[in-house]
Amino acid sequence: MTSKVMNPGTGRIFYGWFALAGAMLVIFVVGGIFIYSYGVFLPVACKEFGWSRASVGAGLSLGILAFGLPSPLFGVMVARFGPRFNIVLGNALAALGFAGMFLVTEVWHIYLLYIFTGLTAGIGGYIAGSAIANNWFIQKRSLALGMFVASGGLGGFVFAPVTSALISAIGWRLSWVVLGGIVLVVASLIGGLVLIRNRPEDMGLLPDGKSADSFMPAATMGNSTGGATGHVGWRAGWALRIPATWLIGAFNGAGAFAMGTMSAHQVAYLGDWGFAPMTAAMTMSVVAISVVVGSLGFGTLALKFNMRYLASISFVIQIIAMGILLTTRNLTFIYIYAVLLGIGHGGINTAVPTIVGAYYGRDHYAQVIGIVLPFQVVVQAASAIIAGAIYDATTTYIPAFIVAAALSIVGLLCVFIARQPKLPQPNDQHSMLSHR
């Protein structure tokens, strides 16, 4: 059975928006709970069990490593089985991991459960979800990916205070069971099973809802629509030989250090200065909602302007934010810091998949993003441990914040020089295959 190719003039809603909504639900729920709920849980666990912040922070670090280090494998799984299968299966298993936190009595229980949760959420998380956006949109790629990334920030805005309220009302153990149930129903069943379809071609459609005679991908990075789509496919081995691949990975990792540090320790840092737990949790919500603003804003701007330049601006904003945090204890300025950090980080998060999609195209997006993601994962995982260890050794987070600002400067330099590589021409295919 065939489906009519959807044309913008038909008045029907392009199904890509529904598929994107499913991916957004996944990252909204899983991203919000996996990162932001853990930051609320950390000081509670330390107080109840007498564990150090470094030891509990290591649980998130291990989970992040499990989420991202196998990403080359996750990319292959997405290419082989399709994003939808990975999203449904991975998040159903991740729900069990979250609910299993109910049983924690030793710190190694956290490590084991968060490794399992990170691994399964990785199967059905960022790579699979962003592949949906990249599959269904080309000319509107940056906007779709900005909406996808923004959903993760929106999840933090919602789940940080929700987790704090749940812990106050029913305790942290039952809170994890409730959060696991939300992941199962919203991410795996509604987002994955009901809404998501892998590619527009599976439904007789084309990306962006274009008709066959009007579809023509652009060929430049002046906006986010260019790249290798429809071109002779890039191969992962070929991509590894291109400096831009490593520069994208480097600025992805550099941008992650600040957010990794703050996600794990911002609530505890503000608590040390005498702020109430709900006030500290709300600053995380401000960061999260500002990530939404940054992701959507920069994703929209990238429809007209070079995403590489916009990513540079995002790093500048993040550097300014860290400078404010290092020089104030005033709550008003802390909120300003939170807004700027979120906007800058949202821009960086949108830039990474947008640039990968524009440089490497749809067919090999999942494999290449799987190469780039571990840079972010290793740094973000290390940042939670490093910041906790610095605090335990010095009783202050200031040196860790200085490192975060310095790495942001490194990221700014990397993104500025990560220019679009020359695409291999069809007559280069033999050369490409010989390097596989």
Image (spheres, helix red, strand yellow):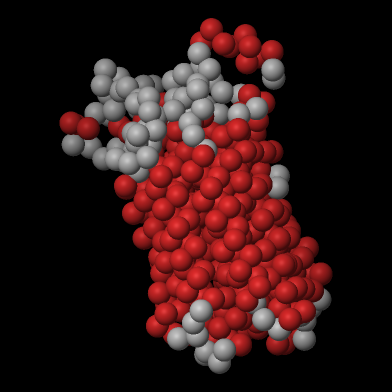
In the displayed structure image, the side of residue 45 where residue 24 appears, left or right:
left
Relative vertical location of residue 189 with respect to residue 56 in this rendering, above or below: above
Residue at the spot 19% in from the left edge and 31% down from the top edge: 10
Q: In which quarter of the image is the C terminus?
A: top right
Could you say where residue 36 lies in the image, as x and y percent from the top left? 56, 69
Q: Report the residue at 63% width, 11% height from top.
A: 431
Q: In this view, does 429 lie to the left or right of 51?
A: left
Residues 158 and 308: in front is 308
Q: Horizontal placement of 231 versus 56: left or right?
A: left
- Image point 45% across, 58% down: which residue? 316
User: In the image, residue 63 lies at what x, y percent?
Assistant: 69, 60
Residue 124 location (% of width, % of height): 59, 48
Q: Which residue is drawn at 61% across and 46% down?
A: 250
Residue at the far bottom in the pictured view: 274
In this view, the residue in front, 433 or 305, is: 305
The answer, for residue 118, to whether it is visible in the render is: no
User: Is residue 97 or residue 108 the one in the foreground?
Assistant: 108
The vertical placement of 332 against 239, above or below, is: below
Compared to 271, does 190 lie above or below?
A: above
Q: Where is residue 27 in the image (x, y as percent from the top left)?
A: 50, 55
Q: Is residue 328 visible?
A: yes
